Image (cartoon, helix red, strand yellow):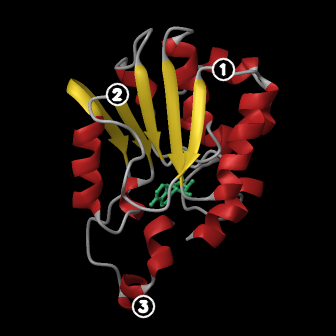
Amino acid sequence: MKAKYTQVAASPAGLFDYPTGKAGLETLGYDPEVLSAFPDQLFESFCGVGNHFAENNIKEGDTVLDIGCGAGVDLLFAAQLVGKEGHIYGIDSTEAMLAVAEQMIEKYRLVNITTSFVASEAIPYSDDMFDVVISNGVINLFIDKLKLFKEVYRVLKPGGVLQFADVMATEDLAGPLSVRIASWSQ
Ligand SMILES: C[S@@+](CC[C@H](N)C(=O)[O-])C[C@H]1O[C@@H](n2cnc3c(N)ncnc32)[C@H](O)[C@@H]1O
Protein backbone atom coordinates (compact mmCIF):
# COMPACT_ATOMS: atom_id res chain seq x y z
CA MET A 1 0.00 0.00 0.00
CA LYS A 2 2.75 2.45 0.97
CA ALA A 3 4.63 1.64 -2.27
CA LYS A 4 1.55 2.52 -4.29
CA TYR A 5 0.99 5.86 -2.53
CA THR A 6 4.69 6.72 -2.79
CA GLN A 7 4.20 6.37 -6.56
CA VAL A 8 0.98 8.44 -6.39
CA ALA A 9 2.97 11.28 -4.77
CA ALA A 10 4.88 11.54 -8.06
CA SER A 11 1.86 10.89 -10.29
CA PRO A 12 -1.34 8.84 -9.97
CA ALA A 13 -1.63 8.45 -13.76
CA GLY A 14 -2.76 4.92 -14.65
CA LEU A 15 -2.96 3.76 -11.02
CA PHE A 16 -6.71 4.17 -10.41
CA ASP A 17 -9.97 3.14 -12.05
CA TYR A 18 -11.43 6.63 -11.49
CA PRO A 19 -10.33 10.15 -12.56
CA THR A 20 -7.57 11.65 -10.40
CA GLY A 21 -5.63 14.92 -10.35
CA LYS A 22 -7.31 18.07 -11.66
CA ALA A 23 -9.63 16.01 -13.89
CA GLY A 24 -10.91 14.20 -10.80
CA LEU A 25 -11.50 17.47 -8.96
CA GLU A 26 -13.41 18.91 -11.91
CA THR A 27 -15.52 15.74 -12.22
CA LEU A 28 -16.41 15.99 -8.51
CA GLY A 29 -17.40 19.66 -8.81
CA TYR A 30 -14.64 21.27 -6.73
CA ASP A 31 -14.80 25.09 -6.67
CA PRO A 32 -13.41 26.28 -10.04
CA GLU A 33 -12.26 29.57 -8.45
CA VAL A 34 -9.86 27.77 -6.12
CA LEU A 35 -8.84 25.40 -8.94
CA SER A 36 -7.87 28.32 -11.16
CA ALA A 37 -6.09 30.22 -8.37
CA PHE A 38 -3.28 27.65 -8.07
CA PRO A 39 -1.08 25.87 -10.65
CA ASP A 40 -2.39 22.53 -11.97
CA GLN A 41 0.71 20.81 -10.60
CA LEU A 42 -0.62 21.31 -7.07
CA PHE A 43 -3.59 19.07 -7.84
CA GLU A 44 -1.69 16.28 -9.61
CA SER A 45 -1.66 13.74 -6.76
CA PHE A 46 -5.33 14.13 -5.79
CA CYS A 47 -6.95 10.70 -5.64
CA GLY A 48 -10.06 11.35 -3.59
CA VAL A 49 -13.52 10.06 -4.52
CA GLY A 50 -15.91 12.74 -3.23
CA ASN A 51 -16.32 16.48 -2.72
CA HIS A 52 -16.65 17.39 0.98
CA PHE A 53 -17.10 21.03 0.19
CA ALA A 54 -20.41 20.54 -1.62
CA GLU A 55 -22.11 20.01 1.78
CA ASN A 56 -21.05 23.29 3.46
CA ASN A 57 -20.20 21.60 6.75
CA ILE A 58 -16.93 23.50 7.19
CA LYS A 59 -17.30 27.05 8.57
CA GLU A 60 -15.02 29.98 9.27
CA GLY A 61 -13.06 29.42 12.49
CA ASP A 62 -13.52 25.63 12.52
CA THR A 63 -10.85 23.14 13.56
CA VAL A 64 -10.83 20.33 10.99
CA LEU A 65 -9.03 16.97 10.73
CA ASP A 66 -8.40 15.27 7.37
CA ILE A 67 -7.67 11.55 7.83
CA GLY A 68 -5.38 10.36 5.00
CA CYS A 69 -4.80 13.86 3.65
CA GLY A 70 -2.39 12.57 0.99
CA ALA A 71 -0.79 15.38 -1.02
CA GLY A 72 -3.02 17.91 0.75
CA VAL A 73 -5.56 19.06 -1.85
CA ASP A 74 -8.50 18.89 0.59
CA LEU A 75 -6.34 20.64 3.22
CA LEU A 76 -5.94 23.52 0.79
CA PHE A 77 -9.68 23.78 0.05
CA ALA A 78 -10.61 23.49 3.74
CA ALA A 79 -8.03 26.14 4.68
CA GLN A 80 -9.79 28.65 2.42
CA LEU A 81 -13.04 28.05 4.33
CA VAL A 82 -11.83 28.18 7.95
CA GLY A 83 -9.72 31.32 7.46
CA LYS A 84 -7.15 32.67 9.91
CA GLU A 85 -9.16 31.82 13.02
CA GLY A 86 -9.53 28.17 12.07
CA HIS A 87 -6.99 25.37 11.63
CA ILE A 88 -6.74 22.24 9.49
CA TYR A 89 -4.81 19.15 10.58
CA GLY A 90 -3.89 16.43 8.09
CA ILE A 91 -2.62 12.96 8.96
CA ASP A 92 -1.28 10.33 6.57
CA SER A 93 0.78 7.12 6.63
CA THR A 94 2.84 7.75 3.46
CA GLU A 95 5.81 10.05 3.95
CA ALA A 96 6.06 10.87 0.22
CA MET A 97 2.45 12.12 0.13
CA LEU A 98 3.03 14.26 3.25
CA ALA A 99 6.20 15.67 1.68
CA VAL A 100 4.14 16.95 -1.28
CA ALA A 101 1.59 18.50 1.11
CA GLU A 102 4.36 20.11 3.17
CA GLN A 103 5.98 21.65 0.05
CA MET A 104 2.61 23.21 -0.80
CA ILE A 105 2.14 24.52 2.77
CA GLU A 106 5.59 26.09 2.75
CA LYS A 107 5.37 27.54 -0.75
CA TYR A 108 1.99 29.20 -0.20
CA ARG A 109 2.61 30.00 3.50
CA LEU A 110 -0.56 28.18 4.54
CA VAL A 111 -0.04 28.83 8.23
CA ASN A 112 -3.42 27.39 9.21
CA ILE A 113 -2.47 23.83 8.10
CA THR A 114 -0.45 21.27 10.10
CA THR A 115 0.38 17.75 8.88
CA SER A 116 1.56 14.69 10.81
CA PHE A 117 2.68 11.17 9.99
CA VAL A 118 0.61 8.33 11.51
CA ALA A 119 1.32 4.63 11.54
CA SER A 120 -1.87 3.20 13.09
CA GLU A 121 -5.55 3.85 13.77
CA ALA A 122 -4.56 6.01 16.77
CA ILE A 123 -5.26 9.70 16.07
CA PRO A 124 -2.53 11.82 17.68
CA TYR A 125 -4.84 14.60 18.96
CA SER A 126 -6.78 15.29 22.12
CA ASP A 127 -10.42 14.50 22.93
CA ASP A 128 -13.16 16.87 21.68
CA MET A 129 -10.76 18.86 19.51
CA PHE A 130 -12.43 18.95 16.08
CA ASP A 131 -15.57 20.56 14.67
CA VAL A 132 -15.35 18.48 11.50
CA VAL A 133 -13.45 15.32 10.52
CA ILE A 134 -13.13 14.65 6.80
CA SER A 135 -11.63 11.72 4.90
CA ASN A 136 -11.51 11.16 1.17
CA GLY A 137 -10.88 7.67 -0.22
CA VAL A 138 -9.04 6.44 2.86
CA ILE A 139 -11.20 4.68 5.46
CA ASN A 140 -11.54 1.63 3.21
CA LEU A 141 -7.75 1.25 3.51
CA PHE A 142 -7.76 0.93 7.31
CA ILE A 143 -7.49 -2.61 8.62
CA ASP A 144 -9.30 -1.96 11.94
CA LYS A 145 -12.20 0.33 10.96
CA LEU A 146 -14.01 0.03 14.32
CA LYS A 147 -10.90 1.24 16.14
CA LEU A 148 -10.62 4.16 13.72
CA PHE A 149 -14.29 5.17 14.14
CA LYS A 150 -13.87 5.06 17.95
CA GLU A 151 -10.90 7.40 17.57
CA VAL A 152 -12.90 9.74 15.33
CA TYR A 153 -15.68 9.83 17.94
CA ARG A 154 -13.11 10.61 20.65
CA VAL A 155 -11.52 13.57 18.84
CA LEU A 156 -14.79 15.10 17.56
CA LYS A 157 -16.42 17.78 19.70
CA PRO A 158 -19.94 16.89 20.90
CA GLY A 159 -22.19 17.61 17.90
CA GLY A 160 -19.19 17.59 15.56
CA VAL A 161 -19.46 16.22 12.02
CA LEU A 162 -17.73 13.27 10.35
CA GLN A 163 -17.88 13.53 6.59
CA PHE A 164 -16.19 10.89 4.49
CA ALA A 165 -16.27 9.66 0.92
CA ASP A 166 -15.10 6.20 0.03
CA VAL A 167 -15.17 3.31 -2.38
CA MET A 168 -16.91 0.09 -1.45
CA ALA A 169 -17.41 -3.30 -3.05
CA THR A 170 -21.08 -3.97 -3.83
CA GLU A 171 -20.49 -7.63 -4.61
CA ASP A 172 -17.85 -10.25 -3.80
CA LEU A 173 -14.63 -9.72 -5.70
CA ALA A 174 -13.79 -12.42 -8.20
CA GLY A 175 -11.04 -15.03 -7.65
CA PRO A 176 -7.61 -13.68 -6.77
CA LEU A 177 -8.93 -10.09 -6.42
CA SER A 178 -10.61 -11.04 -3.14
CA VAL A 179 -7.31 -11.91 -1.45
CA ARG A 180 -5.18 -9.29 -3.14
CA ILE A 181 -4.79 -6.34 -0.75
CA ALA A 182 -4.00 -3.97 -3.64
CA SER A 183 -7.62 -4.43 -4.80
CA TRP A 184 -8.67 -2.23 -1.85
CA SER A 185 -7.09 0.83 -3.41
CA GLN A 186 -7.93 0.58 -7.08
C1 LIG B 1 -6.81 7.34 -2.23
S1 LIG B 1 -5.56 8.31 -1.39
C2 LIG B 1 -6.49 9.73 -0.95
C3 LIG B 1 -5.60 10.89 -0.57
C4 LIG B 1 -6.33 12.19 -0.31
N1 LIG B 1 -7.37 12.03 0.68
C5 LIG B 1 -6.94 12.74 -1.59
O1 LIG B 1 -8.17 12.91 -1.63
O2 LIG B 1 -6.19 12.98 -2.54
C6 LIG B 1 -5.42 7.39 0.13
C7 LIG B 1 -4.48 8.03 1.16
O3 LIG B 1 -4.66 7.34 2.40
C8 LIG B 1 -3.41 7.19 3.03
N2 LIG B 1 -3.54 6.09 3.98
C9 LIG B 1 -3.70 4.77 3.73
N3 LIG B 1 -3.79 4.07 4.87
C10 LIG B 1 -3.70 5.00 5.88
C11 LIG B 1 -3.72 4.92 7.29
N4 LIG B 1 -3.84 3.74 7.91
N5 LIG B 1 -3.58 6.07 8.01
C12 LIG B 1 -3.47 7.26 7.38
N6 LIG B 1 -3.42 7.40 6.04
C13 LIG B 1 -3.55 6.29 5.30
C14 LIG B 1 -2.46 6.94 1.87
O4 LIG B 1 -1.12 7.18 2.23
C15 LIG B 1 -2.99 7.92 0.83
O5 LIG B 1 -2.37 9.17 0.95
114 or 29, which is in the foreground? 114
Give how far across and how far down residue 117 sits, in percent: 57, 52
31 or 8, which is in the foreground? 8
Cβ of mark 1 under 8 Å from ligand 1: the answer is no
Cβ of mark 2 under 8 Å from ligand 1: the answer is no
Q: Is label 2 in a helix, a strand or a loop?
A: strand
Find residue 10 and report its image quarter.
bottom right
Q: Is residue 28 visible?
A: no
Q: Is residue 132 above or below residue 12?
A: above
**Picture residue at 22% right of the left edge, 40% below the top:** 153
Q: Residue type at mark 3: give it.
A: Pro
Name the quarter where the N terminus is drawn: bottom right
What residue is pinned by disc 2?
A: 130
What residue is pinned by disc 1?
A: 111
Q: Residue type at mark 1: give it.
A: Val
**Picture residue at 68% right of the left edge, 40% below the top:** 101
